[in-house]
Amino acid sequence: MQSNHQDGHDPARPQRPGAAVGRAWQWLVEGFAALGTVLIGVLMVIICADIVARNLMGASLPLVSELGALLLVMIVSLQLAAAIHADRLARTDLFLVGLKRSRPRTAALLSAVFNLVGAAIIGLIAYASIRILGKDWSSGDYIGIIGIATLPTWPFRALILAGMTIASLEFLVRMIADLRSIVTREARP
């Protein structure tokens, strides 16, 4: 029997307790990816404006190189969790695809190890970002030229830290899903 409800929720069937948390997590991951996408547009506008300024005025706009570098790192960190969630990271799946068919538990275990290592590495990057954010916050670090155009760097660093933290947590979510699939396969006859 199918539900006729728009949201797919059948009131006769109870929801799992973690379903709301899962949806909220999905919204967070997708929201960060959407922000990253908007920032790609901002970066394109900045680069095009700089090209026009160089051709018309013979000089670059202030902040473009520094802002471009920070935006690029920020975009990657904001969209990393969505790439992990969608299983779009570059890795050698040629071996894993065949292994999934012949030995699904072994493939799930290998994937869990991959996700654990990914969580550790991205977690270390997030941890290192905390110190950089603290230094930028306390020192009032900025990019640009005083009197012409300046921007504080801490908001960029904060978003980089948030993106890396969420990406590390997404790796852990994927690892738990892999481990659950191993347990459920073993429980089945």
Image (cartoon, rainbow, N blue to C red):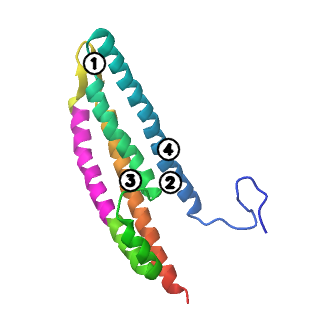
Disc 1 from disc 2: Cα separation: 38 Å
Task: Indicate whether residue 127 is drawn in magenta.
Answer: yes
Disc 2 from disc 3: Cα separation: 11 Å
User: Is 129 drawn above or below residue 68 in the view shown?
Assistant: below
Q: Do the residues labelled 4 and 1 touch (CB within 8 Å)?
A: no
Residue 73 in picture, x, y percent from top left:
31, 40
Residue 35 in picture, x, y percent from top left:
46, 38
**Disc on res. 167:** 3
The residue pinned by badge 4 equals 31
Residues packed near mark 2 inside 10 Å, few (<14), some (14 to 19) or many (20 plus): some
- Magenta segment boundaries in residue numbering: 117-138
Is residue 111 shown to the viewer in this render? no
Residue 94 falls in image quadrant? bottom left
Give the amino acid at mark 3: Ala
Tell me the element at label 2. helix
Residue depicted at x 37% and y 19%: 49
Disc 4 from disc 1: Cα separation: 30 Å
Task: Indicate whether residue 159 is drawn in magenta.
Answer: no
Residue 32 falls in image quadrant? top left
Q: Which one is in front in this view, the residue at disc 2 or the one at disc 3?
A: 3
The residue pinned by badge 1 equals 62
Residue 176 in picture, x, y percent from top left:
43, 69
Tell me the element at label 4. helix
Residue depicted at x 33% and y 67%: 114
